[in-house]
Image (cartoon, rainbow, N blue to C red):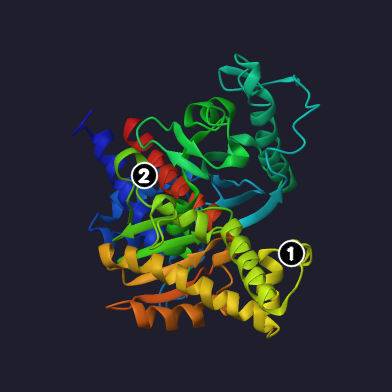
Amino acid sequence: MTGTPQYIRNLNENLIMDALINQGSMSRADISRHTGLSKPTVSSAVEHLIERNLVKETGRADNAQGRKATLIQFNETAYYVCGVDIGATQIRIALSDLSGQIIAYATYPPMDQGMKGMPEREPVQSYGDTETESGIETSDSSEMPVLHKLYSYVDQLLQKNRLQWKDIRCIGFGIPGVVLPGSGKISRIVDPLAGMEQQFSRDALANAFPCDVLLDNDVNLAALGEYRRGAAMESPLFVFFSIGAGTGAGIMVHGHLLHGLGGLTGEVAEMLMEDGQRLEDVLSAEGLMQLTKRHHQKNGEVSGLHTRTLDSHTANHSPKTIFEAARSGEVWAIDIMKEYSKMIASALRQISTLLAPELIVLGGGIGGNGDVLLPLLRKAAAEQFPVQPQLTCSDLGEQAVVTGAVQVALQQTLLNLQQEALEE
């Protein structure tokens, strides 16, 4: 088909779509000037794009004289995409039109709760030529509860926004695990989701949902989200460093995520600190709580407090209460934060020595507490780093992963639409 009039027409349509996506509303004459295509070619291609519902007329241009030109705009609501963050403690789902702007967002209980008593079968619905039960292939009933629940969450958000599955072209999924780049299989996953590697593989998700699916590590997608819509917009080389129940890093170079051998780029949990401990054991939420316990024991021994009293005092705390105490100016919490920040800075120094990033963005449930951590981190970094990168906190917060997932789904959808035009 290459070189035929049909193929050339479709190339022209893709060129026009790219112009409208990047430039916004344009008249036919503007499109002609921008693309170099003749006015008759532009007019013919635009009419076909209107028939495909991919562009639309939006009114008259505001030109000073002569006949007002009709403006053409990319139809951002022709289709929609979703981003799903399969977290260990919460499921987050975002719905986006083709502009990449999130138009709906919701959170749901995690996969490890409420799994018992799930109905095994639902009325059959038809999606194209394949019959599925609520969109889930029934060949393997062992996968039914997990995928059924995940499907139902997305379905709820669609119904709430008066959309149908035929409106969704692609879903991007983020998982707290290592995703093999080629096969989409999961080689490692966080403990709360252990045993669900097969259920959340790309093939299993593709069987469960009636649209294209993409799967990547959640921290990688958070990095992409910050690059496209957050604190690292257009940064040529930066690291997203996530600290929460676990630790991880997403690394982007000139807009491209690094995945590496086996998808292991950024799996910093196994890095060793100066004392030989794993980075994740020291910096995760559990690591912070162990640091708090050691602090109370050390200071309790000085003041003669009983061990049972110390254990009770530690048990009353969580990462959240420790940060709140630091904000309130409580000396013990500030002392813990100073020590904790030095450990974070030590880890970041190792990363920076190898990559020399211009920017490090902190995120995750713990890393997101920038008001407490950043002043202490910058001071510690100034003492430890030969050259200090810019340190900042996530702009997107808990929506970083779903924002990145939306972005990969959007990119895939636009590529598919272009490819479909060429195959017509």
Say few, some or many: other residues with alpha carbon within 10 Å of mark 2 (under 14 / 14 to 19 / 20 or more): some
Q: Amino acid at mark 2?
A: Leu
- Measure the C-alpha gap from mark 1 to mark 2: 42 Å
Q: Quick check: 91 left or right of 251?
A: right
x and y, in percent, of residue 130 in the image? 57, 18
Is residue 74 visible in the rendered image? The answer is no
Q: Residue at 58% x, 65% y: name it.
A: 291
Helix, strand or loop at label 1? It is: helix
Asked where in the image residue 287 lies, by quadrant, the reply is: bottom right
Above or below, 34 against 215 in this view is below
Q: Residue 264 shows which numbered tag? A: 2
Mark closer to the observer (1, 2): 1
For residue 421, which quarter of the picture? Answer: top left
Residue at horizontal 74 percent and vertical 67 percent from the top: 310
Image position of 311 with respect to 14: above or below: below
| Label disc, if present, on residue 145 of the rendered structure | none
On screen, residue 179 versus residue 10, left or right, reads right
Q: Are marks 1 and 2 in contact (CB under 8 Å)?
A: no
Q: Position of residue 309 (x, y in %)?
A: 79, 66
Q: Earlier in the sequence, mark 1 or mark 2?
A: 2
Amino acid, disc 1 = Thr
From what the image shows, is residue 321 above or below residue 285? below
Up the image or down, 339 lies above or below 204; here it is: below
Q: Which mark is residue 307?
A: 1
Q: Quadrant of the C terminus?
A: top left
